[in-house]
């Protein structure tokens, strides 16, 4: 999919989030799972910072996307979230997760879809389960993708996806790879479906 994407703003405080406009697709998951990489792969450019050191993204970063290059305003926003920790979690989604993320996921009226990234090359993680359960309880639209699908053989990947699906109690886990581009077309399709549903719900064309 050919799109034009550009950085809009960073925020660590709900008061600084941009005024709600176009539908938003947020990328959530543990540190180092590949959120920024997946966002870049979808947008087809180096927008978000990628790093092998966990905890690279510390702010909520908003990127505007246009399919119709003549339109002055973004038609869709991709939102890169900081990751939650490797280790302990507590009463909020994660004790280590900055406090501004929970309000974003819970209250943002233009959030059309939270893409929950889980690493397909490791066993199901309790912290991921906690986020997915929390989104379900708050009735926020979400979808689970298995990242780094390129790291496993087809057999191992299929087994891992099944395990993740059962552990997180979801209908499907979409395998994706920012390295090879696997699954990106399918993910774009799901994003556009969620965006259209959000538009219909808000009465926008
Ligand atoms: N093999 C493989 N490596 C990947 C893939 N996506 C990301 N990585 C690697 O995983 C590491 C973390 O990637 P990021 O995109 O920065 O992860 P993040 O989830 O944004 O991390 P934080 O911002 O720290 O929360 C980097 O070394 C990437 O090169 C993938 O699809 N395949
Ligand atoms: Mg990141």
Image: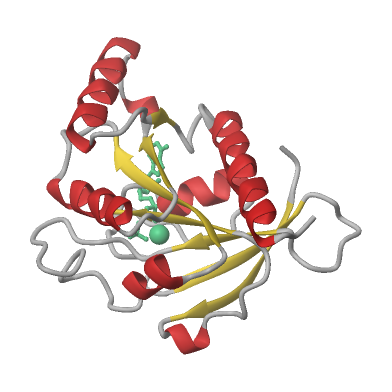
* Residue 48 appearing in the image: no
Residue at image location 43% in from the left, 72% down from the top: 107
User: From the image, which quarter does the N terminus lie in?
Assistant: top right
Left or right of 112, for residue 140: left
- In the image, 171 versus 53, the foreground residue is 171
Residue 4 percent location from the top left of the image:
75, 54
Q: Residue furthest top?
A: 155
Query: What is the quadrant of residue 121 in the picture?
Result: top left
Q: Residue furthest right?
A: 70
Q: Would you place residue 16 above or below residue 116 in this image? A: below
- In the image, 156 versus 89, the foreground residue is 89
Residue 156 percent location from the top left of the image:
25, 16
- In the image, 86 versus 51, the foreground residue is 86
Colour convention of the picture:
secondary structure
- In the image, 66 versus 92, the foreground residue is 92
Where on the image, by quarter, is ligand 2?
bottom left
Residue at image location 42% in from the left, 85% down from the top: 13
Q: Would you place residue 54 above or below residue 153 in this image? A: below
Left or right of 55, for residue 201: right
Query: What is the quadrant of residue 201 in the picture?
Result: bottom right
* Residue 106 appearing in the image: yes
What is the count of numbered marks? 0
User: From the image, which quarter does the C terminus lie in?
Assistant: bottom right
Left or right of 190, for residue 176: left
Left or right of 124, for residue 177: right
Residue at image location 61% in from the left, 38% down from the top: 188
Residue 118 percent location from the top left of the image:
30, 41
Residue at image location 79% in from the left, 49% down from the top: 67
Residue 161 percent location from the top left of the image:
29, 24
């Amino acid at each position: 999919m050919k799109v034009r994407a550009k950085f809009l703003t960073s925020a660590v405080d709900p008061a600084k989030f941009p005024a709600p406009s176009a539908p938003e697709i947020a990328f959530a998951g543990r540190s180092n799972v590949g959120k920024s990489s997946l966002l870049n792969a979808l947008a087809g450019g180096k927008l978000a910072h990628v790093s092998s050191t966990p905890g690279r993204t510390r702010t909520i970063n908003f990127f505007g996307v246009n399919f119709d290059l003549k339109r002055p305003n973004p038609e869709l926003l991709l939102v890169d979230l900081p990751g939650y920790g490797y280790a302990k979690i507590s009463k909020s989604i994660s004790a280590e997760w900055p406090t501004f993320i929970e309000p974003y996921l819970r209250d943002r009226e233009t959030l059309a879809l939270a893409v929950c990234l889980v690493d397909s090359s490791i066993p199901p993680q309790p912290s991921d389960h906690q986020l997915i359960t929390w989104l379900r309880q708050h009735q926020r639209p979400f979808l689970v993708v298995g990242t780094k699908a390129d790291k496993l053989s087809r057999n191992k990947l299929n087994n891992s996806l099944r395990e993740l699906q059962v552990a997180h109690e979801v209908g499907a886990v979409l395998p994706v790879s920012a390295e090879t581009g696997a699954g990106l077309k399918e993910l774009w399709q799901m994003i556009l479906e969620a965006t259209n549903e959000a538009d219909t719900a808000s009465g926008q064309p």
